[in-house]
Image (spheres, rainbow, N blue to C red):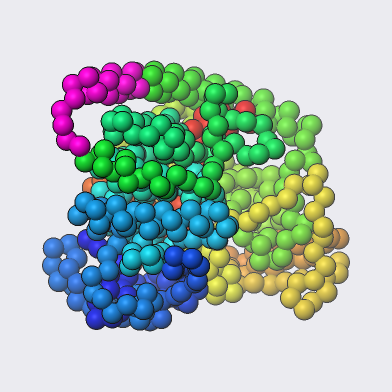
Amino acid sequence: MQLLTIENGELRLNSNLDEYTFGKTGHDNILSYEGVIFDGKNFRQWTFEDVKSYDAEKNGSLQRVVFYCAKNPLGNDAENIKTLAQYFEEGGENALTAVKAVCTAITAAATNGNPIPFVGAGGIMIDGEKVLFAPEALFSYAANTLPAEETLNQHTGFLNDTIKDLPALCFERAAIIYRLLAGRLPFTATDSIARNADIFDRKFLPIEYCVNGIDSGLALAINNALKLNSTAVNVPGKRKKGKSSEDLRPVADFPLEKIDEAFRLSQNNKEDKDFEEKVSAYIKAQNSKINTKRHIKRNATTLTVIATIIVIVICVTVSTLRTRGEDYTSVGLTSTQTIRAYMNGVNEKDTMLLSDFGDGKAAGDYGDMVSRIYVMHKQRLAYGNDNGFGYPANWLFYITDEAKYKRSGIYGVTNLKIDGKAETLAVELKKKNQNPAPLEKEGNITLENGSTSVHKVEYYLLYTEGEEVDYIVEKVTSTVTLTFKKNRWIITDIQYDGKNLGVDCNAFKKDYFAALEKTNGEVIPAVDSLRSKYEWLPEKDAMQREKEQIEYYLTHPYASLGL
């Protein structure tokens, strides 16, 4: 399914959402999402201009679907302009020409420092020398509604979410050229966690084992770019990571002039038994090496889990006595940011933050409630093979089958709104020993000791009681009062009003498992598909942050211990 098309002189991006679902996304502010066009020499921004509904095929039937639309910004009335993904499907010389145009644009962006959207082959259109990149956020939202295999081939298979800026550009360029020459993507796992594990372990077939006789310099440029990840990027002036024999610095320039000959070699279908045996031997050795590495990592992680409770007790005790300055502070935060950080502390069960950011009976009672959950959470974890009380996004990533569903409680907030405005829980906090500068004004008000700020705070609170599997969802409306004491905002009163929504837990479980089956186990698109029915599900950015955190701990198993 092609998401980005040109029809009747109009550029259209299929959101793959019906009108009702689209209305709940908040993605209709299209002018805030910019794409980029490269004309062979220069870059310019463009945006969609309108949101329209058209009949389109979805799930095997004709449905009314929402599209982002604009007059064709390429300025060409031809209807045969195609995406890079379409050229890959067709193959041949046209695909070669398209790849060279796209890589010329990426190389120019890398060389000159021009930001371009990371959208993958399905979000890139080619018209001669002109290359159009769709707005990154809009295309990503749309691509993630597709089946996992299509999402991979149009979007995620060309990207590396663990890096950004120049390293990410180099990776995408290499993945595009690899797809042209090898006829497949370098990392083919549709599950994002599995794919990122392959990226970290460099589990791809080097291009010289895909194209017999390829130029060694070109092969090195492709392979090194595909090895770039958050643990293997060398930055000039910093300690070099990775093997000492490798130079994994991202390189803006690229030997594009060598692609033509490599493409001709890739089209050679003559049988070469010696080369095939060489490839087979490499794959066997690579699999053995990676499987051994992962086996060791799994065993190490298991031992870590067994020892975690003892180590945490020791670390927390020592930390409390010696590093109080490492605690976070609300100094420098606005009143709204203080509330966001406090609510994130509820999800994280960070009792020290709640104690420090709140004062008074109401805030103390709220903190005591979270403290009780924290104790029960640790008790359940101590049983082994139990997730304790996960916050909502963590819970959804964990309960992917019936057995895990029975082994996880839930406690936390979703869909925070402050004064009617949707807010993320993510706040950049400073530690006390960083001595952040105090906030002097908020809005037009000069702050002084005793100043107050009152906000209407809305959210959903999800919680299980004791060891019960079923959970309660409350829609909460609170009035939160903050007082500016000395040099920072502190929450001094919380007027809480919660309404039990009476959620049918079994119905949700069935719907969620069915959605996971449709998305091949991909949690985020499964949750996205249910959000219009279950409005209390965590917002998109909360799910994405949890995914990134899971991926980080998979590759850094000792990070929770500060190692």
Residue 188 sits in quarter: top left
Residue 50 in the image: above or below residue 261: below
Residue visible at 45% across and 59% down in the picture:
105
Q: Is residue 44 left or right of residue 77?
A: right
Secondary structure mostly seen in magenta is helix
Is residue 275 on the magenta stretch?
yes
Residue 202 sits in quarter: top left
Residue visible at 50% across and 67% down in the picture:
42
Observer-nearest of 512 and 301: 301
Residue visible at 54% across and 35% down in the picture:
248
Q: Position of residue 17 (x, y in %)?
A: 29, 69
Residue 76 in the image: above or below residue 89: below
Q: Is residue 109 left or right of residue 129?
A: right
Q: Is residue 403 left or right of residue 436?
A: left
Q: Position of residue 440 (x, y in %)?
A: 83, 67
Q: Which residues are magenta?
A: 268-288
Observer-nearest of 64 and 362: 64
Q: Position of residue 290 (x, y in %)?
A: 38, 23
Residue 92 in the image: above or below residue 399: below
Observer-nearest of 136 and 461: 136
Looking at the image, which residue sits at the far left?
61
Is residue 429 on the magenta stretch?
no
Residue visible at 59% across and 74% down in the picture:
419
